[in-house]
Image (spheres, coloured by chain):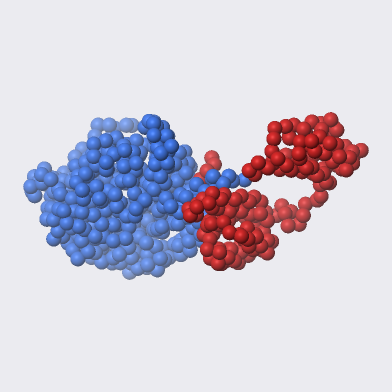
């Protein structure tokens, strides 16, 4: 047995998960994890499955493409690789970085550049842009894991400085405050 | 993974609804500081407070920064000074108050509470000295708060002490006449005082408490008000059961914050975590008002008919939501209705919607009592004592804490304005109706016996 990562991208419609999972089942494969998200009308799904040794990755991809192409979906299969060093589980502390203010070109690039420079991994990223002047209607949200070796204060300083430059309200708060307020 | 809705609603609470932690209060037992040498006592007190409280403010600031939530006040509560400094006279007690004020400034806390005596059943020598020292102690310091417990459900009401407190309040106000009687705003008279209140002016550390303990007081009236406004805008047909459920859920959130921050502060300075006081505490700022909640519930103003019922519902919902959110609930735990500290309540008093009589009725269904009520400077000590006695009776009979913080504003009449500043706010001076000055009832003295339902054993 070996592990495959299958990614599916395309216009959202009923039956995508069903089509992928049926084909995997027919190939005696086992789905370990599935994640999916929909942005506006677009679907993106990622499946981690153990597949039989005899089944090659290109063979699986071509079988999936046969089913998914007619549905207007792109599929890509690749072998699962060992964990990359930057995300190797030595999770430090989880913070939520928010920038509030009107959308502008390069907003995400300039903020994430700082996060990347400090070797911090973004675990989740969401954009809430409704337009208008209310800062709470235009928010970028980055959930990050800050490794123990990262200089938190230097990261926060750089982010706040960039926020001031871009005229954004920058919030940096430990994730627990959001969990505490919203979840039992 | 958090949802964007969870993140946005949390940011709104923190940024536009004034969600904050009102106080982190470090309780410090001073019993091991006792000495019959005044200098030694003061030195011991200073050393102990400095040792334990040294890191309180930096820890609060650091944790406040980490979570992006303000910790508005950092305070200290101590063992009752009437016991700690029992051998000393009133003049010497004032020295102790000055020591407390100095050390509070050194460790940078806003207030230190516990210049206190517990006299519900009678007065010891230390209690007498302390009560006598209160006017000078409060007038001569900025950060010291005093409280005297004159009644309890188990003991009844010590009317001798009540009368003394009427005189002490008058004297304290007179000594700070140029500040509208500010000293009286730092003095609470209690029935059934809890041992772990983190809020001022009533904070002290009870005898049954640990050597050092962190108690926190949460805030959040703005959050409750906005939650009601939003819900009713979307669901105008909601009934009071549904609104009460919403308040309960909101109180849960507010209290959870107190629990989170309190525990982390306690851990970081290596001191035991005590309790969360899940009160709704206003400040004199728009949007941080308990009074505004009454308007959101559909009343013209706090004080109009329906107010007591609305407050009863609010207070109960806060307790239910808060109790679920915290492992240990303590202190006063209910809604506060301090007149001058709440812009909206002060306005209700100014417009005549809220009278002292209605305020007193409302205190039968919430925590505290006649709190931060400015009254005419010529109100006699006997009348002040009688007002205290009424408030104490509500607490004693209902097995609950009640208190008074009355400020007879020197040289001013009903309808004029009194200004106390900062969190203490400002207010119109409320008329004390039907008081003729003398009051033979309170002059009888003695002790009003404990009620029959105090006999529970």
x and y percent of residue B433 in the render? 12, 45
A12 to B188, vertically: above or below: above
Residue drawn at point x = 20 percent, y = 57 percent:
B417
Chain A: what color?
red
Question: Which of these two is toward me, B283 or B179?
Answer: B283
Q: Is residue B338 left or right of residue B7?
A: left
Q: Quadrant of residue B93?
A: bottom left
Locate the N terminus of chain B by quadrant.
top right
x and y percent of residue B323 in the render? 44, 39
- Specify the chain shown as blue: B
Question: Which of these two is toward me, B240 or A140?
Answer: A140
Q: Quadrant of residue B453?
A: top left
Residue drawn at point x = 47 percent, y = 50 percent:
B12
x and y percent of residue A65 in the render? 82, 39
The mark tally for this picture is 0
Locate the C terminus of chain B by quadrant.
top left
Q: Quadrant of residue B250?
A: top left
Question: Which of these two is toward me, A169 or B292?
Answer: A169
Q: Is residue B223 left or right of residue B189?
A: right
């Amino acid at each position: 047995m070996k592990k495959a990562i299958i990614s599916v991208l395309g216009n959202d419609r009923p039956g995508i998960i069903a089509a992928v999972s049926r084909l995997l089942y027919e190939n005696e494969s086992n789905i370990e994890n599935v994640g999916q998200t929909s942005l506006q009308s677009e679907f993106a799904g990622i499946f981690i499955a153990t597949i039989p040794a005899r089944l090659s990755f290109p063979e699986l991809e071509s079988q999936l493409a046969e089913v998914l192409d007619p549905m207007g979906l792109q599929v890509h299969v690749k072998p699962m690789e060992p964990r990359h060093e930057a995300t190797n589980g030595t999770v430090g502390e989880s913070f939520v970085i928010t920038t509030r203010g009107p959308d502008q070109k390069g907003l995400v690039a300039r903020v994430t550049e700082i996060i990347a420079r400090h070797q911090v991994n973004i675990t989740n990223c969401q954009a809430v842009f409704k337009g208008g002047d209310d800062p709470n209607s235009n928010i970028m949200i980055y959930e990050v894991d800050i490794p123990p070796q990262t200089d938190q204060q230097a990261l926060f300083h750089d982010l706040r400085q960039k926020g001031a430059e871009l005229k954004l309200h920058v919030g940096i708060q430990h994730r627990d405050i959001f969990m505490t307020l919203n979840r039992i | 993974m958090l949802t964007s809705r969870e993140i946005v609603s949390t940011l709104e609470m923190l940024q536009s609804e004034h969600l904050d932690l009102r106080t982190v209060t470090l309780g410090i037992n001073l019993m091991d500081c006792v000495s019959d040498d005044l200098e030694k006592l003061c030195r011991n007190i200073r050393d102990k407070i400095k040792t334990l409280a040294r890191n309180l403010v930096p820890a609060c600031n650091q944790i406040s920064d980490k979570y992006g939530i303000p910790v508005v006040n950092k305070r200290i509560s101590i063992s009752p000074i009437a016991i700690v400094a029992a051998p000393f006279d009133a003049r010497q007690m004032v020295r102790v108050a000055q020591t407390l004020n100095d050390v509070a400034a050194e460790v940078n806390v806003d207030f230190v509470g516990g210049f206190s005596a517990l006299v519900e059943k009678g007065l010891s020598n230390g209690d007498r000295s302390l009560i006598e020292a209160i006017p000078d102690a409060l007038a001569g310091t900025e950060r010291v708060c005093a409280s005297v417990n004159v009644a309890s459900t188990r003991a009844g009401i010590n009317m001798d002490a009540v009368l003394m407190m009427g005189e002490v309040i008058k004297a304290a106000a007179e000594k700070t006449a140029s500040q509208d009687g500010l000293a009286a705003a730092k003095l609470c008279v209690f029935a059934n005082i809890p041992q772990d209140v983190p809020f001022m002016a009533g904070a002290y550390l009870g005898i049954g408490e640990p050597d050092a303990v962190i108690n926190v007081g949460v805030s959040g009236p703005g959050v409750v008000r906005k939650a009601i406004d939003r819900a009713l805008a979307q669901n105008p047909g909601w009934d009071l059961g549904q609104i009460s459920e919403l308040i309960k859920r909101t109180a849960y959130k507010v209290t959870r914050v107190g629990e989170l921050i309190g525990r982390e502060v306690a851990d970081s300075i290596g001191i035991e975590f005590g309790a969360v006081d899940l009160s709704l505490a206003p400040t004199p700022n728009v949007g941080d008002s308990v009074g505004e909640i009454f308007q959101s519930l559909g009343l013209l103003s706090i004080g109009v008919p329906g107010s007591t019922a609305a407050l009863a519902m609010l207070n109960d919902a806060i307790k239910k939501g808060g109790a679920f959110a915290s492992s240990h609930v303590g202190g006063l735990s209910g809604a506060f209705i301090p007149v001058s500290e709440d812009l909206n309540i002060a306005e209700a008093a100014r417009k005549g919607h809220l009278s002292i009589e209605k305020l007193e009725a409302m205190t039968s269904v919430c925590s505290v009592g006649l709190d931060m009520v400015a009254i005419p400077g010529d109100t006699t000590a006997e009348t002040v004592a009688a007002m205290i006695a009424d408030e104490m009776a509500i607490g004693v009979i209902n097995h609950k804490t009640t208190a008074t913080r009355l400020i007879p504003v020197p040289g001013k009449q009903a309808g004029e304005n009194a200004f106390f500043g900062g969190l203490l706010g400002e207010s119109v001076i409320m008329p004390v109706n039907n008081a003729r000055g003398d009051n033979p009832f309170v002059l009888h003295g003695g002790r009003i016996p404990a009620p029959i339902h105090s006999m529970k054993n």
